[in-house]
Amino acid sequence: NAGVMQNPRHLVRRRGQEARLRCSPMKGHSHVYWYRQLPEEGLKFMVYLQKENIIDESGMPKERFSAEFPKEGPSILRIQQVVRGDSAAYFCASSLTRGDYNSPLHFGNGTRLTVT
Amino acid sequence: TQLLEQSPQFLSIQEGENLTVYCNSSSVFSSLQWYRQEPGEGPVLLVTVVTGGEVKKLKRLTFQFGDARKDSSLHITAAQPGDTGLYLCAVPTGNQFYFGTGTSLTVIP
Protein backbone atom coordinates (compact mmCIF):
# COMPACT_ATOMS: atom_id res chain seq x y z
CA ASN A 1 0.00 0.00 0.00
CA ALA A 2 1.68 3.19 -1.20
CA GLY A 3 -0.74 5.55 0.54
CA VAL A 4 -0.45 7.47 3.80
CA MET A 5 -0.61 5.05 6.70
CA GLN A 6 -1.88 6.04 10.11
CA ASN A 7 -2.03 3.90 13.20
CA PRO A 8 -3.74 3.05 15.31
CA ARG A 9 -7.13 3.57 13.62
CA HIS A 10 -8.83 3.77 17.01
CA LEU A 11 -7.27 4.72 20.32
CA VAL A 12 -8.96 4.85 23.71
CA ARG A 13 -7.23 6.60 26.57
CA ARG A 14 -8.26 7.52 30.10
CA ARG A 15 -7.94 11.11 31.22
CA GLY A 16 -4.34 11.86 32.14
CA GLN A 17 -2.76 9.21 29.93
CA GLU A 18 -0.60 9.85 26.88
CA ALA A 19 -1.73 9.34 23.30
CA ARG A 20 0.78 8.67 20.56
CA LEU A 21 -0.40 8.81 16.95
CA ARG A 22 1.76 7.63 14.07
CA CYS A 23 1.85 8.60 10.42
CA SER A 24 3.93 7.14 7.61
CA PRO A 25 3.76 9.44 4.57
CA MET A 26 3.53 8.31 0.98
CA LYS A 27 6.78 7.00 -0.42
CA GLY A 28 8.95 9.89 -1.51
CA HIS A 29 6.97 12.53 0.41
CA SER A 30 8.93 14.56 2.92
CA HIS A 31 6.21 17.04 3.95
CA VAL A 32 3.68 16.06 6.62
CA TYR A 33 0.64 17.88 7.96
CA TRP A 34 -1.52 17.01 10.95
CA TYR A 35 -5.18 18.04 11.10
CA ARG A 36 -7.88 17.54 13.71
CA GLN A 37 -11.56 16.98 12.94
CA LEU A 38 -14.60 17.02 15.18
CA PRO A 39 -17.85 15.32 14.05
CA GLU A 40 -19.59 17.07 11.15
CA GLU A 41 -16.85 19.70 11.00
CA GLY A 42 -14.07 20.58 8.63
CA LEU A 43 -10.41 19.98 9.24
CA LYS A 44 -8.41 22.23 11.55
CA PHE A 45 -4.70 22.62 10.85
CA MET A 46 -2.38 21.69 13.69
CA VAL A 47 1.21 21.41 12.48
CA TYR A 48 3.36 21.18 9.35
CA LEU A 49 6.67 19.32 9.40
CA GLN A 50 9.45 18.44 7.03
CA LYS A 51 12.02 15.78 7.82
CA GLU A 52 13.53 16.64 11.22
CA ASN A 53 12.00 20.13 11.23
CA ILE A 54 8.81 21.72 12.51
CA ILE A 55 7.91 24.38 9.96
CA ASP A 56 4.63 25.70 11.36
CA GLU A 57 2.98 24.66 14.61
CA SER A 58 0.62 27.61 14.85
CA GLY A 59 -2.48 25.41 15.03
CA MET A 60 -1.23 23.18 17.81
CA PRO A 61 -1.92 23.95 21.50
CA LYS A 62 1.26 25.07 23.25
CA GLU A 63 0.76 22.71 26.15
CA ARG A 64 0.50 18.92 26.13
CA PHE A 65 0.81 18.60 22.32
CA SER A 66 4.01 17.90 20.41
CA ALA A 67 4.94 16.57 16.99
CA GLU A 68 8.03 15.21 15.36
CA PHE A 69 9.12 13.82 11.99
CA PRO A 70 12.47 12.12 12.51
CA LYS A 71 14.98 11.32 9.79
CA GLU A 72 14.00 7.68 10.03
CA GLY A 73 10.53 6.42 10.88
CA PRO A 74 7.04 7.85 10.98
CA SER A 75 5.83 11.23 12.08
CA ILE A 76 4.46 11.19 15.64
CA LEU A 77 1.78 13.39 17.18
CA ARG A 78 1.96 13.12 20.96
CA ILE A 79 -0.71 14.30 23.35
CA GLN A 80 0.24 14.20 27.02
CA GLN A 81 -2.23 14.11 29.91
CA VAL A 82 -5.22 13.78 27.63
CA VAL A 83 -8.54 15.40 28.51
CA ARG A 84 -12.02 14.65 27.20
CA GLY A 85 -11.84 17.64 24.87
CA ASP A 86 -9.00 15.95 22.98
CA SER A 87 -11.45 13.35 21.66
CA ALA A 88 -11.50 13.78 17.89
CA ALA A 89 -10.28 12.30 14.62
CA TYR A 90 -6.68 13.19 13.83
CA PHE A 91 -5.64 13.10 10.20
CA CYS A 92 -2.20 13.11 8.70
CA ALA A 93 -1.50 14.23 5.14
CA SER A 94 1.66 14.22 3.10
CA SER A 95 2.83 16.01 -0.02
CA LEU A 96 5.78 15.79 -2.34
CA THR A 97 6.79 19.39 -1.83
CA ARG A 98 5.27 22.21 0.18
CA GLY A 99 1.55 21.82 -0.44
CA ASP A 100 0.08 23.94 -3.19
CA TYR A 101 -1.93 23.31 -6.32
CA ASN A 102 0.99 21.47 -7.89
CA SER A 103 1.57 19.31 -4.83
CA PRO A 104 -1.78 18.41 -3.27
CA LEU A 105 -2.29 16.71 0.05
CA HIS A 106 -2.76 12.95 0.34
CA PHE A 107 -4.57 11.94 3.51
CA GLY A 108 -4.47 8.88 5.68
CA ASN A 109 -7.64 7.37 7.14
CA GLY A 110 -7.10 8.98 10.50
CA THR A 111 -6.82 7.97 14.13
CA ARG A 112 -9.99 8.30 16.18
CA LEU A 113 -9.05 9.19 19.73
CA THR A 114 -11.58 8.68 22.50
CA VAL A 115 -10.77 9.93 25.99
CA THR A 116 -12.82 8.37 28.74
CA THR B 1 -15.32 34.51 10.97
CA GLN B 2 -14.42 31.54 8.80
CA LEU B 3 -12.09 32.11 5.86
CA LEU B 4 -14.21 29.72 3.79
CA GLU B 5 -17.95 29.35 4.25
CA GLN B 6 -19.65 26.35 2.72
CA SER B 7 -23.37 26.02 2.11
CA PRO B 8 -25.58 24.30 2.73
CA GLN B 9 -24.13 22.60 5.79
CA PHE B 10 -26.38 19.56 5.33
CA LEU B 11 -28.19 18.32 2.23
CA SER B 12 -30.38 15.26 1.85
CA ILE B 13 -31.76 14.45 -1.60
CA GLN B 14 -33.27 11.60 -3.57
CA GLU B 15 -31.25 9.59 -6.04
CA GLY B 16 -31.41 11.16 -9.50
CA GLU B 17 -31.78 14.75 -8.33
CA ASN B 18 -29.33 17.53 -9.16
CA LEU B 19 -27.64 19.69 -6.54
CA THR B 20 -25.18 22.51 -6.12
CA VAL B 21 -23.01 23.28 -3.12
CA TYR B 22 -21.03 26.46 -2.56
CA CYS B 23 -17.74 27.60 -1.12
CA ASN B 24 -17.53 31.36 -0.48
CA SER B 25 -14.99 33.80 0.84
CA SER B 26 -14.22 37.50 0.84
CA SER B 27 -10.57 36.75 0.07
CA VAL B 28 -8.90 36.06 -3.26
CA PHE B 29 -7.04 32.79 -3.70
CA SER B 30 -4.44 31.52 -6.15
CA SER B 31 -6.17 28.13 -6.31
CA LEU B 32 -8.92 26.12 -4.66
CA GLN B 33 -9.41 22.43 -4.12
CA TRP B 34 -12.44 20.20 -3.55
CA TYR B 35 -12.21 17.03 -1.47
CA ARG B 36 -14.74 14.32 -0.67
CA GLN B 37 -14.58 12.49 2.64
CA GLU B 38 -16.54 9.29 3.19
CA PRO B 39 -17.43 8.13 6.72
CA GLY B 40 -14.46 6.65 8.53
CA GLU B 41 -11.96 7.68 5.88
CA GLY B 42 -9.67 10.57 5.06
CA PRO B 43 -10.48 13.26 2.49
CA VAL B 44 -9.70 12.47 -1.14
CA LEU B 45 -8.86 15.20 -3.63
CA LEU B 46 -11.43 15.61 -6.41
CA VAL B 47 -10.14 18.62 -8.31
CA THR B 48 -7.97 21.73 -8.20
CA VAL B 49 -9.09 24.95 -9.92
CA VAL B 50 -6.60 27.69 -10.61
CA THR B 51 -7.92 30.21 -13.14
CA GLY B 52 -10.81 32.62 -12.49
CA GLY B 53 -13.91 31.37 -14.30
CA GLU B 54 -12.42 27.93 -14.80
CA VAL B 55 -14.83 25.01 -15.17
CA LYS B 56 -13.73 21.42 -14.67
CA LYS B 57 -15.81 18.28 -15.09
CA LEU B 58 -15.33 14.94 -13.41
CA LYS B 59 -18.03 12.58 -14.73
CA ARG B 60 -21.28 13.92 -13.19
CA LEU B 61 -19.49 16.55 -11.09
CA THR B 62 -18.91 20.07 -12.42
CA PHE B 63 -16.63 22.46 -10.55
CA GLN B 64 -16.42 26.19 -11.18
CA PHE B 65 -14.01 28.78 -9.82
CA GLY B 66 -15.48 32.26 -9.54
CA ASP B 67 -14.26 34.95 -11.93
CA ALA B 68 -12.74 36.88 -9.02
CA ARG B 69 -11.24 33.70 -7.50
CA LYS B 70 -13.14 34.25 -4.24
CA ASP B 71 -15.67 31.45 -4.49
CA SER B 72 -16.42 28.12 -6.08
CA SER B 73 -19.34 25.80 -6.73
CA LEU B 74 -19.76 22.08 -7.16
CA HIS B 75 -22.72 20.81 -9.17
CA ILE B 76 -23.70 17.14 -9.18
CA THR B 77 -26.02 15.86 -11.89
CA ALA B 78 -28.26 12.86 -11.25
CA ALA B 79 -26.89 12.18 -7.77
CA GLN B 80 -26.25 8.59 -6.75
CA PRO B 81 -25.94 6.99 -3.30
CA GLY B 82 -22.19 6.67 -3.92
CA ASP B 83 -21.98 10.47 -3.91
CA THR B 84 -22.83 10.49 -0.21
CA GLY B 85 -20.10 12.11 1.85
CA LEU B 86 -18.66 15.30 3.26
CA TYR B 87 -17.57 17.75 0.56
CA LEU B 88 -14.79 20.09 1.62
CA CYS B 89 -13.24 23.02 -0.19
CA ALA B 90 -9.69 24.05 0.69
CA VAL B 91 -7.24 26.81 -0.21
CA PRO B 92 -3.48 27.09 0.25
CA THR B 93 -2.64 29.80 2.74
CA GLY B 94 0.72 30.28 4.36
CA ASN B 95 2.12 26.92 5.36
CA GLN B 96 -1.17 25.06 5.31
CA PHE B 97 -4.29 24.21 3.40
CA TYR B 98 -7.28 25.90 5.04
CA PHE B 99 -10.45 23.82 4.89
CA GLY B 100 -14.02 25.03 4.78
CA THR B 101 -16.73 23.89 7.14
CA GLY B 102 -17.98 21.25 4.70
CA THR B 103 -21.29 20.18 3.17
CA SER B 104 -22.59 16.82 4.36
CA LEU B 105 -24.48 15.22 1.46
CA THR B 106 -26.78 12.23 1.79
CA VAL B 107 -28.26 10.69 -1.34
CA ILE B 108 -31.24 8.49 -0.58
CA PRO B 109 -31.80 5.49 -2.88
Image: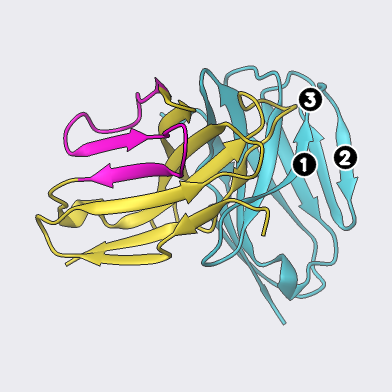
Tell if the residue under mark 1 belongs to the same chain as the one under mark 2.
Answer: yes
Q: Residue at x 60, y 63 (%)?
A: B38
Q: For this view, does A46 lie left or right of residue B94? A: left
Q: Nearer the viewer, residue B25 or A89?
A: A89
Give me the chain that's cyan.
B
The reply to whether the C-beta atoms of the residues labelled 3 and 1 are less than 8 Å apart is no
Q: Colour of chain A?
A: yellow
Which subunit holds the residue at mark 2?
A: B
Q: Amino acid at mark 1?
A: Val
User: Which sits earlier in the primary sequence, circle 1 or circle 2?
Assistant: 1
Where, quadrant-wise, is the C terminus of chain B in this rendering?
bottom right
Tell me the CA gap for discs 3 and 1: 10 Å
Q: Nearer the viewer, residue B107 or A108?
A: A108
Bounds of the magenta span? A54-79
Q: Which mark is residue B56?
A: 2
Q: Which mark is residue B50?
A: 3
Q: Which x, y percent locates residue A46?
A: 38, 35
Helix, strand or loop at label 2? It is strand
Crowd band around label 1 with a 10 angstrom C-alpha radius: few (<14), some (14–19), many (20+): some
